[in-house]
Amino acid sequence: MSAIIPAVRGALPLLGNMGALLVGSPWDVTEGWLREYGPVASFAVPGARWLVTKDLSLIRHVLTQGADHYVKEASSMAPFHDLLGGGLLSSDHELWRRHRAILGRAFRVDALRGVPAITERAAARLFRRWEAAARAGEAVDVGEGFRALTLEVIAAACLGMSAAESDAILPRLYEPLVAECNKRVWHPYRALLPIPARSRYRAGLRELDALLVDKIAARRRRGPPPEDGDMLDMLLGGLRDLPWSRALEGLICDELKTMLFAGHDTSSAMLTWTVHALSRAPELLAQLRAEADAVTPGGALPEYEALRGLDLAQACLKEALRIYNVVPVVTREAARDDQVGEWSIPRGTKIMLHLQAVHRDPENWEDPGRFDPSRFREKSPGYRWIPFVAGPRSCVGQHFSLLEAKLVLALLVQRFDLEAAPGNSDLRHRYQAPITPRAPIRALLRRRA
Ligand code: HEM
């Protein structure tokens, strides 16, 4: 027998529950529904009915054992489709399988040995800028700095771009494209109306594609890609048995844009929230500093394996992901009828897996609002902590991201004393994901002796 899934009250004809979703932050509103109706509920938006859940067994089923029965939900990714095309984040089936195998290898822990040196260079650049602000007694915009740093790191790791090249190209060319896609999530008509933003977007996309095609052509002229090269080399090596075509070249461009997209705003938001939480926790900062002094003495990079010692730094990042939920939900669609325990899920059902609700549920975490990294120094939290989800479609960049961020954090606390500037708050952007602070988080820095 199937359980009846409660429907959220107050749905209007045609509009469904859309009004409520638009009034608050959609992630907080849907989390509230799960508190009120239980671990699985359903709601309506124009043209579709959604199921939303924080039930750990249902989430585990959709992400792992039952993953073959589910595909990415198309409308959630639609605004990004022009930009990301057939890249890993938005593709399915055979194309996804082939590229996931290649990129999965490229992002394995033992393939990331080049990342610390790239990160350290980018951090040194950022900290020179921040030192000047510290000397002038000015607060720094933490999010802005980390965005530039993570973009520089991902562009170097994927494309071998120098800092000067990524500075000159990406903020001008790439960031406005992502900003337009984000606007289209809530204003989809922007993609259809003949407004200047639409032609600017198209021209920008053409320019970016042309630049990436040039980079790919230059690599191919250099001969067979080295085994230990960057992500572009890994892609070219992994696809070398396929006949070369414009379509294949386009797919490689899509993967590169996907990496730039998925690999910097997420990591910089995680770092920003972590620094925000730490700026209010002086004892933790002191412990972090002691850890950093032991692992990266005087800011020097140790052997790759020794970076594992940045255990507390990693725990702080994980706790920030739990509390601030940079990616609050992921969405799927049932590709066939499914039965999960007492729940019947007909083909075509759209499902919102509510990571934020899992992370803030007092049934999963004691006193969930308290920032306490020691939660991650004990046993594995299993499905109670899934910011990178799990299973075959888990985040391919999770080790990359934690490696980069824990090193940045260690080098930062080692070099500076930091204090929150007045006015910082926990308020999160209402609807844009990855979720950044609503207003800039600013910090007052002092160079340590
Ligand atoms: C704090 C940092 C990050 C968080 C919280 C995060 C979170 C996630 C989540 C939740 C997904 C699953 C999306 C879904 O199933 O709809 C995902 C997928 C993905 N992430 Fe990340 N991510 C982070 C950093 C990165 C980085 C640094 C990269 C690249 C270097 C990256 C690349 C990707 C890609 C390519 C996918 C698609 C994987 C697939 O479907 O096979 N992410 N990420």
Image (cartoon, helix red, strand yellow):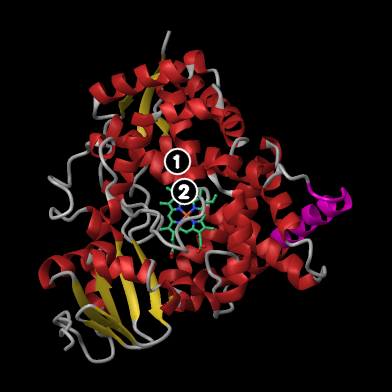
Q: Quadrant of the N terminus?
A: bottom left
Spot occupied by residue 55 in the image (x, y as percentages of width and height): 22, 67
Is 285 above or below relative to 119? above
Q: Are marks 1 and 2 in contact (CB under 8 Å)?
A: yes
Q: Residue at x 58, y 32 (%)?
A: 122
Asked whether residue 371 is in view, the answer is yes
- Magenta: predominant secondary structure element? helix
Crowd around label 1: few <14 · some 14–19 · many ≥20 (10 Å):
some
The residue labelled by disc 2 is: 398
Was residue 209 drawn as part of the magenta stretch in this picture? Answer: yes
| Direction top: furthest residue | 449
Give the residues drawn in magenta, as a range: 207-225
Q: Which amino acid type corresponds to the residue marked 1 in the rendered image?
A: Leu
Spot occupied by residue 271 in the image (x, y as percentages of width and height): 41, 39
Towards the viewer: 8 or 192: 8
Was residue 360 drawn as part of the magenta stretch in this picture? Answer: no
Q: Residue at x 17, y 45 (%)?
A: 369
Q: CA distance from mark 1 to mark 2?
A: 6 Å
Q: Which amino acid type corresponds to the residue marked 2 in the rendered image?
A: Gln
Q: Residue at x 56, y 76 (%)?
A: 93
The residue labelled by disc 1 is: 402
